[in-house]
């Protein structure tokens, strides 16, 4: 497997965590987002969206981090990233999608660059990102509630944790609050696991 990504990409970070939890080996292919390498013709042939991550598996190319994580769960079911119970599974997906669909897309580099291009000042751009993140984390904390387990929703990390922990890195970059509910304790529990620690941005060979 070849994982196309960038050390600071939170979407790529999610896939690194999933691969590590599954004990799967892969090769990195780095694309420096701030230098625009994701828009190079060679990479657009891999992912026409010009986004990371993309995962090459046996000649197939998979895109979108949530789709990749669910593929990994279906093809390598242990340990599971989603609960077997349909209601519990829906709750995990809901927390994951608050971040992956409602928070991350509107505070990522592409959108922030567009705001700047429209003449929005630097402080207002940062403020936009911070507000979006804080609103999302507050909602996540309420959805998670007092589950009792060390992780978002249970005794083992799930897709919800895989999305939450990378988003907290972004939160701190923008000076956003992260002290909502159990979020701090969940992050600490996750980062104590080798799979999460090895996936962290600063642990990647392209880190700056």
Image: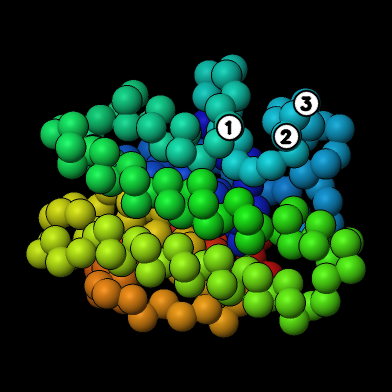
Element on which disc 1 rests: strand
Q: CA distance from mark 3 to mark 2?
A: 9 Å
Mark 3 or 1, which is nearer the eye? Answer: 1
**Which residue: 60% across, 51% down?**
105
In the displayed structure image, the side of residue 58 where residue 92 appears, left or right: left
Q: Dividing the image into 4 quarters, which one contains the C terminus?
A: bottom right
Q: Residue at x 83, y 71 (%)?
A: 120
Q: Which mark is residue 47?
A: none
Q: Secondary structure at mark 3?
A: loop
Report whether residue 21 is seen: no
Query: Can you tell which quarter of the image residue 22 is in?
Result: top left
Q: How far is the residue under mark 1 from the one under mark 2?
A: 9 Å
Q: Which residue is mark 3?
A: 45
**Who is closer to the viewer here, 22 or 64?**
64
| Any part of residue 110 in sight | yes
Residue appearing at x 65%, y 77% in the figure: 127
The x, y position of residue 151, in whole percent, is 22, 61
Q: Residues within 10 Å of mark 3 (few under 14, many from 20)?
A: few
Q: State the image coordinates of residue 80 (x, y, percent, origin top left).
A: 23, 38
Which callout, 3 or 1, points at the residue further toward the start of the chain? 3
Placement of 106 over or under 68, stated as above or below? below
Label 1: few (<14), some (14–19) or many (≥20) C-alpha neighbours in 10 Å: some
Numbered circle sitting on residue 49: 2
Q: Are marks 3 and 1 in contact (CB under 8 Å)?
A: no
Residue at 47% in and 33% down: 68
Pointer 1 with pointer 2, Cβ within 8 A? yes
Q: Earlier in the sequence, mark 1 or mark 2?
A: 2
Camera-side residue: 30 or 89?
A: 89
Q: Secondary structure at mark 2?
A: loop
Lateral position of residue 88 relative to residue 65, left or right? left
**Residue with the mark numbered 1:** 63
């Amino acid at each position: 497997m070849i994982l196309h990504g960038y050390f600071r990409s939170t979407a790529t970070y999610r896939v690194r965590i999933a691969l590590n939890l599954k004990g799967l080996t892969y090769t990195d292919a780095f694309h420096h987002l701030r230098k625009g390498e994701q828009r190079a013709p060679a990479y657009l042939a891999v992912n026409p969206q010009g986004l990371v991550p993309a995962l090459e598996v046996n000649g197939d190319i998979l895109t979108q981090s949530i789709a990749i994580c669910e593929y990994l769960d279906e093809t390598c079911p242990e340990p599971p990233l989603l609960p077997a119970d349909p209601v519990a599974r829906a709750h995990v997906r809901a927390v994951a999608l608050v971040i992956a669909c409602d928070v991350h897309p509107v505070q990522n580099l592409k959108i922030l660059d567009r705001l700047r291009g429209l003449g929005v000042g630097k402080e207002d751009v940062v403020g936009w990102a911070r507000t979006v993140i804080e609103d999302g984390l507050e909602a996540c904390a309420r959805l998670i509630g007092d589950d009792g387990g060390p992780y978002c929703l249970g005794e083992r990390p799930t897709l919800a944790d895989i999305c939450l922990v990378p988003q907290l890195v972004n939160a701190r970059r923008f000076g956003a609050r992260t002290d909502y509910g159990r979020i701090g304790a969940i992050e600490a529990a996750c980062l104590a696991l080798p799979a999460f620690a090895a996936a962290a941005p600063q642990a990647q060979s392209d880190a700056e």
